[in-house]
Amino acid sequence: MNAAVLFEKVSRFFGAVRAVDSVDLAVEEGEFFAMLGPSGSGKTTCLRLMAGFEQPTGGHIEIFGETAEGIPPYRRNVNTVFQDYALFPHLTILDNVAYGLMVKGVAREERRKAAEDALAMVKLPGYGARRPGQLSGGQRQRVALARALVNKPKVLLLDEPLGALDLKLREQMQDELKSLQKSLGITFVFVTHDQGEALSMADRIAVFNEGKIQQLGTPEEVYKRPSTRFVADFVGSSNILEPEFVKKLGGKAGLASLRPEAIELNNKRAGQLSISGTVISRSFLGASNRIIVIVGDTKLHITSPATQPVPEEGSTVSLSFAPNDLHLMETTT
Amino acid sequence: MSTVTSQRVMLAKEAGLVGRISDFFWKHPHVFLALMLAPPLLWLGIIYLGSLLALLLQSFFSIDDYSGLVNYEFTLSTYGQLLNETNLDIIIRTVSMAVIVTLFSALIAFPIAYYAARYAKGKWKAFFYLGVMLPLWSSYLVKIYAWKLILAKEGILTWLLTKLNLLWLLDAWLSLPVIGGNSLSVSYTGTFIVFVYVWLPFMILPIQASLERVPVNLIEASSDLGSTPQQTFRHVLLPLALPGIVAGSIFTFSLTLGDYIIPQIIGSSRLFIGQAVYAQQGTAGNIPLAAAFTVVPIIIMGLYLWMARRMGAFDAL
């Protein structure tokens, strides 16, 4: 079976800037695929390469087994939900949603019906007569989604789709996107700089930095077994432990990551690794406390459930964790 | 710490007249607004609209054929005169010219404006503005006389076409009825060329401004949804640029309707509305008919704007 989207050594340079640098990836059919990274990491350029807004400087792109480079966006059965929605301000909501069908020559009645169904699917029935300017950000987001989905794309591309929404709405849309993707079975590729969003929504995540994929895997793999210092730091802000420190803990000398929530305070049990340090700061986060402990000259972040007692600043505590929570990374620097 | 806390929160009231005036205006913003707006509104209302209204009133008077004096009694006879064959001819000639000049200006201006709005950056953009604006800085009369020389039978255009062995093309064009003539400088074609040249900046700049406001991602979204570039132009770019095109066409259309210098210097001796007004209020002394002539462009522009509005030209504003 062909991959939905296949990149073989794909590069895109802008002058001297290597926006995308020899990237290999395969998005499986029907999966929810996230491209995660900081701004300027090449994730959006990858999305634009899939949409056809950019052409690769080198390499080969296939979409469902068909060569994609050199094919303009309007000949690809791939649709995009834009970051700022890009709704047509001079058209009504219904005409916006029906736009793709209109340019493909679908009869008026048929495309109106399809557009109304799409609006109902994104929970905006009866909004067709309004203009984009009359809708809130969250509603525009849904219209943009309906406008893309009405074309029944083989792949739906989402560029920071929830970036402009407030927290509450964002969480709600995450759930809705996820269930929409499940029920439609369309391949979703979405770009985000929010690691929480990527972890909660995606089937697989590609973590980008400086035009390259740092790690590609399931959310659990990427979170628990980061392969590089960058991934460990960017995804969930892990404690990164230098080789000497790891050796002192009784592990193999190598760069390791240790999740803040894997560490327990003053609760050493059999089989756990342990070390003691001094509490230098603590802050209340609601469901948990963040405690920073210094061991020698290494600072460790600990996320402790709010149900656990909080040690005083300056007190000495013992830190313990299961040996396999200490994850040795492939790289040493 | 103590020096900070000993200071007062509110600053002392500013002494002097200026300070008191500022405080007064801050408390009464409407008074300030009224004071700012009154002079320009008075100017607009009395000098501008008032005199225009006075002029229009004149069109409802008539002129006594024997004494040549204005008869100050309400009558529509001047408008009847306006619709006689000669005068109607003038109106049709002027409106046709204005329509063609406007259409052509829009056609030429759009690609230039599109390039400037989409692709020109940095020094190319500066060059664009300079190129468009520079002709506006030089005297209008100088430009028109320059064109007369260019278009004259002994002018550079004829010379150039002779060198290129293309003079037959010009001769063929000039032998056409209505638009042809003895030479370009005494034909409607010549009038048309100069009109387009002189008014083009007024078309380019509003179109460029409207295209600049079209976000690039709308073009991408259209393409993403399956639009070919032609469809994107028709369904996205053109509707969004339409307010700019209409704004530009208001300039080119009304300026052509009212101009009396270009057709006098370049073209056939047949009159345009502007020349008719000039002749009627000057040599003929027929102020009522001159006033009636000036009403024509006003009505045409009113109709034009009403139609543009009905066609949705301003929907994207």
Image (cartoon, coloured by chain):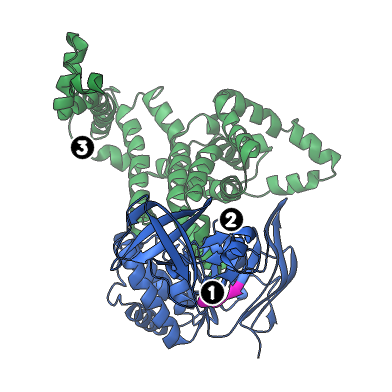
Chain colours: A blue, B green
Q: Does A216 appear above or below B139?
A: below
Q: Is residue A227 visible?
A: yes
Residue B213 image offset from top left, x and y in percent: 47, 49
Whether residue B6 sits left or right of residue A44 in the image: it is left
Q: Which residue is mark 3?
A: B75
Per the image, label 3 sits on a secondary structure element best described as loop
Chain containing the residue with disc 2? A
Point out the tag, 1 or 2, that comes first from the N-terminus.
Answer: 2
Amino acid residing under circle 2: Gly
In the image, the segment drawn in magenta is A216-222
Disc on res. A40? 2
- Nearer to us of marks 1 and 2 is 1
Q: Nearer the viewer, residue B166 or B255?
A: B255
Residue pointed to by mark 1: A323
The reply to whether the C-beta atoms of the residues labelled 3 and 2 are less than 8 Å apart is no
Q: Are marks 1 and 2 in contact (CB under 8 Å)?
A: no
